[in-house]
Image (cartoon, helix red, strand yellow):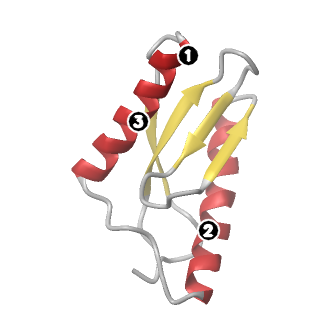
Amino acid sequence: MQPYTVILSPEPKLGGYSASCPAMPGAFGQGQTRQEALESIRSGMEAWLEAMAERGGGALIETPELVAAALASVLEDRAAEGWDLSIETATVQPAIASAA
């Protein structure tokens, strides 16, 4: 099992955080606290990996370019909303392995 980079983004309108994993497009999580968001994204990543394993796939190979592109996208979205550009990254290790 390998750890993956996740992006944590504060939610100005709803409060709390949203979280995404660049190597797993469509895997999202949210929570009122940073810890809740990390637990939520871990669960989302595990569900994503299970669904992809059923299809014979797995996570994308995590590269600096992949993470940078995802960070740029989040920052562009925040700028378009007029929100501050405060985001952070963390490393999350799902309990199941990727087939990739």
Residue 30 in picture, x, y percent from top left: 70, 39
Provide the residue designation for mark 1: 81
Circle 3 — which element? helix
Residue pictured at 57% horizontal, 79% vertical: 52
| Label 2 crowd bin: few (<14), some (14–19), many (20+), radius 10 Å | some
State the residue at coordinates (51%, 89%).
Answer: 56
The one of 82 and 95 positioned closer to us in this rendering: 82
- Alpha-carbon distance for marks 2 and 3? 21 Å
**Which of the pair 90/45 is nearer the observer?**
45
Residue type pointed to by label 1: Glu
The tag earlier along the polypeptide, 1 or 2, is 2
Q: Which amino acid does label 3 sit on?
A: Ser
Task: Name the secondary structure under disc 2.
Answer: helix
Given the image, on which type of amino acid does mark 2 rest? Answer: Trp
Q: How crowded is mark 1: few (under 14 residues within 10 Å), some or many (20 or more)?
A: few
- CB within 8 Å, label 2 to label 3: no
Split into 4 quadrants, where in the image is the C terminus?
bottom left
Nearest the eye: 91 or 8: 8
**Among numbered discs 3 and 1, the one appearing first in the sequence:** 3
Quarter of the rendering containing residue 88: top left
- State the SS at label 1: helix
Which sits earlier in the primary sequence, circle 2 or circle 3? 2
Q: Which residue lies furthest to the front in this view?
A: 80
Residue 31: % across, % down? 73, 36
Q: In whole angstroms, how far apart are the C-alphas of marks 1 and 2?
A: 28 Å
C-alpha separation, residue under disc 3 versus residue under disc 1: 13 Å
Q: Estimate the x, y position of residue 32 in percent, counting from the top left.
A: 75, 29
Q: Mark 3 points at which residue?
A: 73
According to the picture, the residue beneath numbered tag 2 turns out to be 48
